[in-house]
Amino acid sequence: MNSVFFTRNTKRGIFGLCFFVCLNAVAQTPSPALLVLDKEDNMLSIIDPANSKTVARIPTGEGPHEITASEDGKLAFVANYGARTPGNAISVMDLVAQKELRRVDLGALRRPHGITFADGKVWFTAEQNRLVARYDPAANEIDWLLGIGQNGTHMLVFSKDHSQLFTSNIGSACITLLQRDSTSTGWGATNIAVGKGPEGGDISPDGREYWAANSGDGSISIIDIAAKKVVQTLDVRTKRSNRLKFTPDGKIVLVSDLAGNEVLVLDASSRKEIKRFNLGRQPEGILILPDGSRAYVAVAGENTVAVLDLKALEVSARIPTGKGPDGMAWAIRR
């Protein structure tokens, strides 16, 4: 009797231990990890792109809109934009331990949005303050501010060598090009007029052009970076373009149309439309694998991330998420 009892409980114990070990093995943060912000849930989801499974969800501040990861893939930084009340915090996430390390109080800086990691620091816009700021995670302090003086300073895109930084100013219908110089601020600024409501944008992989998706008039403004001016305007007939991304080889441009429920595919060389995907309600953030094989589109109104096969130009999968997926980033451990 005792022997039977011992055997059964031993088996249960072994099974429980195996389950615990297996669960923890499965739940480890993969590399690469697909990071998705569910802004209506105030959560960060860590997803394994190999099997489309969510391995962890971590609470953020209110209304998380954009996210970036450190170069070693161990930390993520979330811009807590806020909902009805303007947000003023950045969440620092430990992707290995899968928890929020700290929530950085930005004080008077309101509506943090566009966020990117470069030179060991976190750069972000403070939309309500019309400026770009920099957070030093090692010192845990804001160590630099630069006023842009334009309305709705929203997104940030760095050039590959980090010598240029582009901001989109939704309310002022312009893109600000910041270039490193020897002035006291360390940057010179040029405002370049574009279409109405520029929001998403990207630098071509060859570094020659910046494409601005204008949410207010259904156009794309193509900027010659060296000349610092718009050289071509494309009428792409979007209802409210949200994000624009080049594929790594520079051949294709993707544009999400939040109000049109579509993703537009353009040939970058000919500037012509190739295809439109109807992905459901409110496609927003776009993220492309470094090898250019697949694109991930956050479809906020459907609570999914659509996976696009960029070779076949078709939807290959849909990944379920929390409510309102939007900002995304890759975390690759090095």
Image: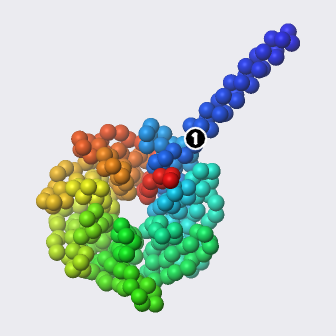
Residue at (52% x, 70% y) in the render: 121
Q: Quadrant of residue 243?
A: bottom left
- Number of callouts: 1
Query: Picture coordinates of residue 238 (x, y %)?
Result: 23, 61
Viewed as shown, does residue 55 lie left or right of 199? right
Query: Picture coordinates of residue 39 (x, y %)?
Result: 49, 57
- The amino acid on which the numbered mark 1 sits, given as a three-letter code, is Ala
The answer to whether residue 59 of the structure is visible from this angle is: no
The answer to which of 179 and 107 lies nearer the viewer is 179
Most extreme residue toward the top is: 1
Q: Quadrant of residue 269?
A: bottom left
The answer to whether residue 243 of the structure is visible from this angle is: yes
Residue at (29% x, 43% y) in the render: 309
Residue located beneath label 1 in the image = 27
> What quarter of the picture does the N terminus occupy?
top right
The colour scheme used to paint the residues is rainbow
Residue at (71% x, 24% y) in the render: 14
Query: Picture coordinates of residue 323 (x, y %)?
Result: 48, 50
Residue at (66% x, 33% y) in the render: 20
Viewed as shown, does residue 205 lie left or right of 184? left
Query: Picture coordinates of residue 96 (x, y %)?
Result: 59, 50
Q: Secondary structure at mark 1?
A: helix
Crowding at dot 1, Cα within 10 Å, few <14 / some 14-19 / many 20+, comes out as: some
Most extreme residue toward the bottom is: 184
Give the answer, above or below, for where 35 lies relative to 78.
above
Most extreme residue toward the right is: 2
Give the answer, above or below, for where 288 lies relative to 208.
above
Give the answer, above or below, for where 129 lies relative to 306.
below
The answer to which of 86 and 253 lies nearer the viewer is 253
